[in-house]
Amino acid sequence: MFKRILSFYIFLALSMLVGCSNDYKPTLSREAKFFAPVYEPVNSRVAIATSNQGRDIECIIHGYGDDTILFIASIHGDETAGTFLLESLDTYLKEHPEFLVGKQLIIIPVANPDGFAAGSRFNANGVDINRNFPADNRVNNKINGFAGLSEPESRAIDSVIRIYKPNRIIVFHEPLDCIDYDGPAQNLAQLLSKTCKLKVKKLGAREGSLGAYAGEDLGIKVVTVELPEEAKNLSQTQLWQQYAKLIFTAINGR
Ligand SMILES: [Zn+2]
């Protein structure tokens, strides 16, 4: 009980720090539930924020340790193969918790739940979440959002990055059939490329993208796995067979 109360007050202090750095004012009760696990080993699925249409933005947390890895899928709601991969990863880790000694995984399986439900790249406001981050190269407009972090989906991801400080971020997209990277992630990208048919290709950080923000500006290793067009036609089992090794390497690689 004492640990829980302590966690709550540590969260309050953290949330005030985050609050100082931008205008995001998270709902206390939801975020308190989410951030408390930083201090305790957990294997849990929690709602970290709510989309414009009222859908939960969920986060799965596995393991506990100094090496933190963030996985994200369906930031573009019509690029869903990564979501199936991350759900398979969740199932695998529940059955093999020993796999994560000294590591903590933060998984956001559906970063844009309104777009996911509508089969749309954009969120319910018509904003591209992967152009809505406060990167140095951002451009404000209708598609990118009229301000960085104007959308609940990008704010949720930004909060996770600020609180958990991941050592590397792996994001799944489609259908460009390559592995792209931002920040100091060239070696990791090459390591992941060896596990599958995807070749490393530097696409260049798009304006206000997660890669531009977290990779180029914050200096975190960001690898973007651009699955091929055919990924849409693969079953969850087939996807796992083809890309489980990439995911395991991302977890173990530095
Ligand atoms: Zn995409």
Image (tube, rainbow, N blue to C red):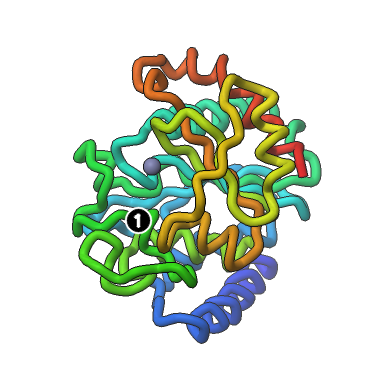
Quadrant location of residue 109? top left
Q: x, y percentage for residue 175?
A: 39, 31
Dot 1: what SS?
A: helix
User: For the point 56% across and 15% down, which residue is it?
Assistant: 241
Q: Is mark 1 within 8 Å of ligand 1?
A: no
User: For the point 57% across and 30% down, which residue is it?
Assistant: 89
Circle 1 crowding by C-alpha within 10 Å: few under 14, some 14–19, many from 20: many
User: Please, what is the three-letter code of the amino acid marked with disc 1?
Assistant: Ile
Q: Nearer the viewer, residue 223 or 10?
A: 223
User: For the point 66% across and 73% down, which residue is it?
Assistant: 6
Q: In this view of the protein, can residue 42 be seen by the observer?
A: no
Provide the residue designation for mark 1: 129
Q: x, y percentage for residue 59?
A: 48, 49
Q: Give the quarter of the figure containing the C terminus.
A: top right
> Where 138 falls versus 223 (above or below)?
below
Q: Nearer the viewer, residue 70 or 194?
A: 194
Is residue 128 toward the left or the right of residue 83 in the image? left
Q: x, y percentage for residue 248?
A: 68, 30
User: For the point 44% across and 28% down, which residue is it?
Assistant: 84
Q: x, y percentage for residue 65?
A: 76, 51
